[in-house]
Image (cartoon, helix red, strand yellow):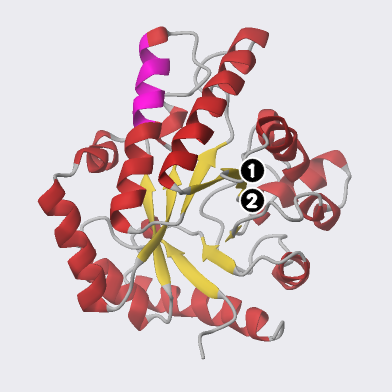
Amino acid sequence: MAKAYTLGLYEKSMPSSLSWREKLTAAKEAGFDFVEISIDETDEKLARLDMSADERLELTGIMKETGLPIRTMCLSGHRKYPLGSSDPEICARGMEIMEKAIQLADDLGIRIIQLAGYDVYYEESTPETIERFGKNLEKAAAMAAEAGVIMGFETMETEFMNTVEKSMAYVNKINSVYLNVYPDIGNITNAAKKYGTDVLEDLKKGAGHVVAMHLKETVPGVFREVPFGTGHVDFESAIQSAWEIGIRKYVTEFWYTGSPQWQSDLAAANQMMTRILEKQL
């Protein structure tokens, strides 16, 4: 019988110099069930959206051969090309990225795209950027519906969408089964600390609409590269609450920063989260 949950590994936790075969093999050896592909704002990662049909076929073949699939996508490329941008060219590029990301997900068998919860990032947010973001989100949800690919908002580090509650306002507004929430427990822990609220209550506000959860460590004001166990995220209670609202897909999000023991770091992260997840069974 299959496991009651799946635990994935964020691609950037491994050296970028590795081939896909090496990344998938390393993730499998560390005990993970799948890998989350990164489509960030760099030209190198955005180029993946233009992979040829043969390259896509080759990658699905590698998944089959290694026995480890790519099942989620972290689409952070919209930071540079946001859906609410005041620049028509940037906005059009953002929508093109959205369309191509959905197509790539469809071709590779990726089930969930994690969307960046920004109207804009490198420019100032205005009522116009917010309105544009909403309209383009509606178009994106229609594209996702056509392909049958699920999207989920990442709860970000900025005020615009740093809680599940804020994400749910858009989910309810768009009202599509293809647009949901894919929260980052580290980010919403920071938001709860900042606002003096309860992070678990915030998480529960997404009940019925949370498609997966990023397991990431943070400290107040710091959102990246905080080693597991050195921050303030209570993974035990977070996973328990997530489990109670039906979340069964989790991704450990951390970064390779040059450590020669990176493979041991993968295994340690897997063991830490597996131990907590097994308690839910």
Near-viewer residue (78 or 151): 151
Near-viewer residue (112 or 158): 112
* Residue at 14% in and 44% down: 52
- Residue occupied by mark 1: 155
**Where is residue 223 drawn, in percent x and y?**
59, 46
Residue 30 vertical placement versus 262 (above, below) = below
Residue 159 is covered by the magenta coloring: no
In this rendering, position of residue 154 left or right of residue 87: right
Does label 2 or label 1 sit earlier along the sequence?
1
- Segment colored magenta: 89-97
Label 2: which secondary element: loop
Give the CA distance from mark 2 to mark 1. Answer: 5 Å
**Where is residue 242 drawn, in percent x and y?**
72, 65
Tell me where residue 236 sits by quadrant.
Answer: bottom right
**Where is residue 142 drawn, in percent x and y?**
50, 33
- Which quarter shows the C terminus? bottom right
Tell me where residue 97 sits by quadrant.
Answer: top left
In this rendering, position of residue 137 left or right of residue 26: right
Q: Say if residue 221 shows up in the picture.
A: yes
Near-viewer residue (64 or 24): 64
- Residue occupied by mark 2: 183
Q: Say if residue 13 shows up in the picture.
A: no
Label drawn at residue 64: none
* Residue at 80% in and 53% down: 199
Residues at circles 2 and 1 in contact by the CB criterion of under 8 Å: yes
